[in-house]
Image (tube, rainbow, N blue to C red):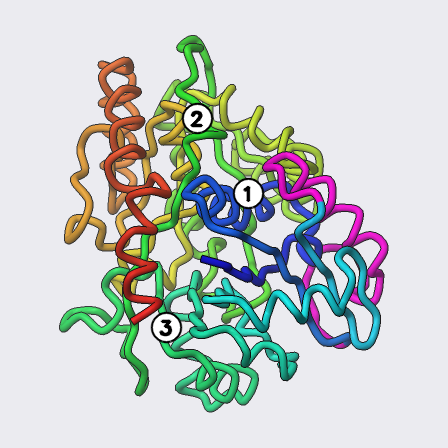
Amino acid sequence: MIIVFAGLIGNCGSGGQAWAYMQYLAGLKDLGHDVYYLEDCPENFVWDSGHKISDIDFRAEFISDCLKLICLDDRWIVRVGDRSKGMDIDKFRDICSQADLLIARANPLSSWREEYNWPRRRVFIDVDPGFTQAAIANQDPSWIEPLKRYEHLFTIGHRVGAADSLIPAVGFKWEKILPPVSLEYWHFSRKNSAACFTSVVRLNGPFGGADCQRRSSFENFLDLPKGTSQKICFAVRDADREFFEINGWNTLLAEEVARTPGSYQEFIENSRAEFLLAKEGYVTTRSGWFSDRSVCYLAAGRPVLMQDTGLNDWLPTGEGVVTFTNLTEAIEGIGSINADYERHRCAARRLAEEYFATGQVFSGFLETAMS
């Protein structure tokens, strides 16, 4: 199939966020599909990347550097208003006219153009379950009207619409998709002497109230460093560093750790495990959310210790992925992983292969998308 995949690689300007999109692009390409990357946002689109949306040269350079890593060197275009970089605009429009599928992840392409109607099917992937549905419930026009253009909507929130979930369907049908990982680019790391549990942490994201973000989650676990000898180190933004350090956490600068896809990958492969506190909104709503960062840890043979978001409905936990709901369970989880680390490492990779590998994720997804 010819697939146009729309994302925000250059807009985010982060190696970690870039990999979240690159997993899809690499996986679809490796399955034999003819894949092209599109980035198109209106000039007033706001994203906390430290770069102006109108800085098309920065975005183009960053996208080019990222996509070279997965052999999509000349198969991308970035558009800002009437300007574009990358592919010739007429060639891109011709591809749209032949395309089988347009996929938009995270941003539903509020800057809609005529040629985005030309592919046979269009699908949107929601990666912020609960926050997206809240925006729809609040009648946010930047979500409601764009979403009506897609034949299918997917979400990584596997419990959206469930009887005991606080996330309603808000008038749309939400198919489910797992965050994919391309095992071609993420290998089981033979290093087993890494010392730190790690993660990349942002206390408050660009969407949702502060009480639904990660700051609230961390405030319930401030005593964790006092309860374990295990070293835990977070890559955080400079603006958030003081919050962590005064509470006894070790930190690195996320701007350096996740500066490129390569530095981000190296950080994960040199970690012992991931320690993940989810956004409070993901936890309280029982969203079934799982992180696109965590699948990278699993693929590298790094266990994931994470706050429970309602995973047990669809993912076996206890080996490779260990969940907790309170401080005591978090400390016990650290002990469990360290007590039989090699078993958890192998289980982590096995979960990546059986649940999150792109071949597994995309088979059902593409069938639904084209129906």
Q: Residue 283's x, y, as percent?
A: 31, 58
Q: Which mark is residue 197?
A: 2
Residue sitting nearer the eye, 106 or 162: 106
121 displayed left or right of 234: left
- Quickly name the residue at label 1: 19
Q: Residues within 10 Å of mark 1 (few under 14, many from 20)?
A: many
Residue positioned 55% across, 68% down in the render: 98
Q: Which residues are magenta?
A: 44-73
Disc 1 secondary structure class? helix
Q: Is residue 54 magenta?
A: yes
Residue positioned 68% across, 54% down in the render: 76
Residue sitting nearer the eye, 298 or 339: 298
Disc 3 residue type? Leu
Disc 2 secondary structure class? strand
- Quickly name the residue at label 3: 153
In front: mark 1 or mark 2? 1
